[in-house]
C-alpha cells in the first residue's frame, strides 16, 4: 500500500526523540484494573495474562505484546488497553516468560522471534473465550514478534482481523548496532542491567548452565545474546538469532491488514527498519513514519498517545 501520511504533531518540548522516549518510559502513568490469568504452555512453562474489560459485553479483543524487559503494566500497554476498553473492546496484556514478576520455570525465556508463545496465547483465547474479532498490537520487540508471526507459513486464526506494530526493530542486526552506539549508551546500559539481573536469578536455578565467569563475560547486549539468548533458544550465535528472528523478511507474506508506526527520530532503528519497499508491494501493509515520537514516545493530549489513537482508528477500519 502507499505510505501513510502521518498527522502526528507533538508538543514542542517532546519533538526531541530522547525526551519523548524517556518521559514515556519513566514518567507516564496509566491507571487501569486488570485481572491475571496464568496459562500453561506446551513445554510445561507458564505465561501470565493481564485482562481488562469493556463496561459492556463485547465480541472484540486486543492482544498486547510488550517490548524488551517490559510487562503488562507498562504504560504503553495499559494506555492502549484503557483506550480500547473505553471503546467497547476487551484487552489482554501478555507478559512474556519471566516478565510478570516471577521467573519462568525453564532455562529459556523469551526473544524477538518467539512466535510460538503468541500462537499458544491465541489458541488459548479461542478455546476458552468467544471473541469473533481479535486485534494484535505490539511495541518494539513485541511488534517484531507480531509481524513475524503474521508473515510465517502458518495458519492465522480467522478471528485475527488487524494488527499494529509500533517502534518495531524489524531488522534486528541493524537495531543491535544502533543500540551499541554512544547516543544510545544510557538505554543500552539500562537494558543490560535488567537482563543481567534476570540471569542472576536463573543462575540460582541452573548453576550448571550459568557460572560467575560466564556472567562477568557479558559486557554488551550482543554479548548477552551470544552467551544466553542464542544458546537458550537454539541459535548458533547472536547474528544467527538476529537474522532468523527479524520480521523484515516476513513482511511480503502478511495477509492481515497491518499498520507499522516507526518514528523517523527513533534512535533504536536502523534505515532497514523503515520498510518502504515492502509496504508499497503489499496491499495489506501500511507504513506510517512520523517525524517525531522517538521510541514508543508518541505523546499527545490527555495522556492518550498518538499511536494508541491510530491503533483504534485502524482496527475500526478493519472490522466486519
Image (cartoon, rainbow, N blue to C red):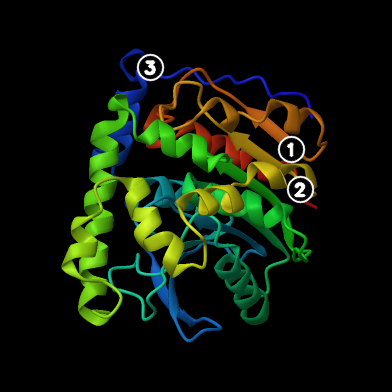
Mark positioned earlier in the residue sequence (2 or 3):
3
On-image quarter of the N terminus:
top right
Crowding near pointer 1: few (<14 within 10 Å), some, many (20+)?
A: many
Q: Secondary structure at mark 2?
A: loop
Mark positioned earlier in the residue sequence (2 or 1):
2
Residue matched to label 2: 254
Q: Secondary structure at mark 3?
A: helix
Per the model, the C-alpha gap separating discs 2 and 3 is 32 Å
In the image, farthest residue toward the top: 12
Residue matched to label 3: 15
Mark positioned earlier in the residue sequence (3 or 1):
3
In the image, farthest residue toward the bottom: 44
Identified at 49% across, 55% down, the residue is 65
Do tag 2 and tag 1 residues touch (Cβ < 8 Å)? yes
Label annotation for residue 285? 1
Taking the image as drawn, is residue 95 in sight?
no
Amino acid at each position: 500500500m502507499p505510505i501513510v501520511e502521518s498527522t502526528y504533531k507533538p508538543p514542542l518540548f517532546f519533538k526531541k526523540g530522547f525526551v519523548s522516549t524517556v518521559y514515556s518510559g519513566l514518567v507516564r502513568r496509566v491507571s487501569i484494573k486488570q485481572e491475571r490469568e496464568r496459562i500453561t504452555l506446551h513445554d510445561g512453562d507458564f505465561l501470565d495474562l493481564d485482562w481488562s474489560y469493556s463496561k459492556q459485553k463485547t465480541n472484540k479483543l486486543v492482544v498486547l505484546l510488550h517490548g524488551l524487559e517490559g510487562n503488562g503494566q507498562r504504560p504503553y500497554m495499559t494506555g492502549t488497553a484503557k483506550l480500547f476498553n473505553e471503546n467497547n473492546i476487551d484487552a489482554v496484556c501478555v507478559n512474556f516468560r519471566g516478565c510478570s514478576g516471577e521467573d519462568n520455570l525453564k532455562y529459556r525465556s523469551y526473544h524477538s522471534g518467539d512466535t510460538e508463545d503468541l500462537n499458544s496465547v491465541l489458541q488459548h483465547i479461542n478455546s476458552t473465550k468467544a471473541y469473533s474479532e481479535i486485534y494484535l498490537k505490539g511495541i518494539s520487540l513485541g511488534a517484531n514478534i507480531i509481524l513475524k508471526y503474521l508473515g510465517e507459513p502458518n495458519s492465522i486464526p480467522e478471528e485475527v482481523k488487524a494488527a499494529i506494530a509500533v517502534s518495531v526493530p524489524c531488522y534486528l542486526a541493524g537495531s543491535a548496532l544502533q543500540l551499541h552506539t554512544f547516543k544510545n549508551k544510557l538505554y543500552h546500559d539500562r537494558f543490560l542491567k535488567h537482563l543481567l539481573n534476570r540471569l542472576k536469578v536463573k543462575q540460582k536455578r541452573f548453576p550448571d548452565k550459568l557460572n560467575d565467569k560466564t556472567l562477568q563475560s557479558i559486557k554488551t547486549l550482543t554479548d548477552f545474546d551470544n552467551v544466553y539468548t542464542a544458546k537458550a533458544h537454539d541459535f548458533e550465535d547472536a547474528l544467527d538469532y538476529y537474522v532468523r528472528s527479524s520480521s523484515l523478511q516476513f513482511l511480503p507474506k502478511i495477509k492481515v491488514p497491518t499498520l507499522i508506526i516507526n518514528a523517523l527520530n527513533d534512535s533504536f532503528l536502523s534505515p532497514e527498519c523503515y520498510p518502504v519497499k515492502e509496504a508499497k508491494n503489499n496491499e495489506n501493509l501500511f507504513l506510517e513514519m512520523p517525524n517525531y515520537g522517538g521510541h514508543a514516545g508518541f505523546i499527545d493530549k490527555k495522556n492518550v498517545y498518538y499511536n494508541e489513537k491510530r491503533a483504534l482508528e485502524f482496527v475500526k477500519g478493519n472490522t466486519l
